[in-house]
Image: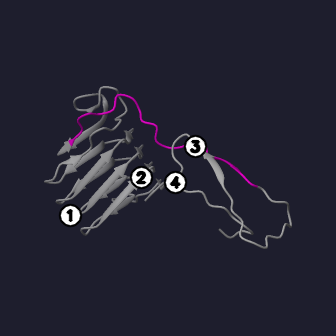
Amino acid sequence: FEHTNLRNGGAQHLSALVLSQASSATFVSGRIEASSTNGLRVVSSSKLNVIDTIISANANNGLIVSDSSFALVRNSSITGNAESGVTGNSNLTVDARSNWWGAPDGPRPAGSGDLVTGNVDYSDFLTVPPVLVDEAPPMVNSLSLTQGAVISRPLSVSADVFDNVRVGRVVFFVDGVS
């Protein structure tokens, strides 16, 4: 899941996203927020990687890992979750190092940020929020053709793309087709 936003998910006792049955997934540069229960739940020997993602304002927990499952969370912002930011109920340690927990002194119980419970390594926490989501779209300077121009031979188009975070891909459209 890249640049994916999960907002207002979950119902009754269900999380916004449940990863189960020995599956694996990676969340990069997304948002998991405002779930009516838990943001993410990892169960049944599954594996989850969360990188550069905002996990916030979930009514219960931001992330729960259980049943011999594993999760790695890096350079993410975990704040404002009602019960805990990360709960590790697995025999494997949740690797949640190098994250922002909403406070410069780290997560609770040691600091004053989001709560961490269970088997979670939150060492090397970030003391300032990371830059995560690109709020401004990339600027593209490219060749423009006169309306109605006919191209009878291959045309090479180049672009200079500037972005303050990262440009993953540039797609050109001609008559609505990429």
Disc 3 or 2, which lies upstream in sequence?
2
Disc 2 or 4, which lies upstream in sequence?
2
Type of amino acid under label 3: Asp
Q: How many callouts does the rendering have? A: 4
| Residue under the point 66% across and 52% down | 159
Q: Is residue 14 visible?
A: no
| Residue under the point 46% across and 41% down | 132
> Magenta segment, principal secondary structure?
loop
Please give the range of residues in magenta: 121-143
Instruction: Name, please, the residue furthest toward the top.
Output: 105
Residue 138 on the magenta span: yes
**Residue on which the image places disc 4:** 168
Mark seen at residue 45: 1
**Residue on which the image places disc 3:** 163
Q: CA distance from mark 4 to mark 3?
A: 10 Å
Q: CA distance from mark 2 to mark 4?
A: 12 Å
In the rendering, at what x and y percent does residue 115 appear? 28, 37
Type of amino acid under label 2: Val
Mark 1 touches mark 2? (CB < 8 Å): no
Q: CA distance from mark 1 to mark 2?
A: 21 Å
Image quarter for residue 149?
A: bottom right
In the rendering, at what x and y percent does residue 35 appear? 42, 52
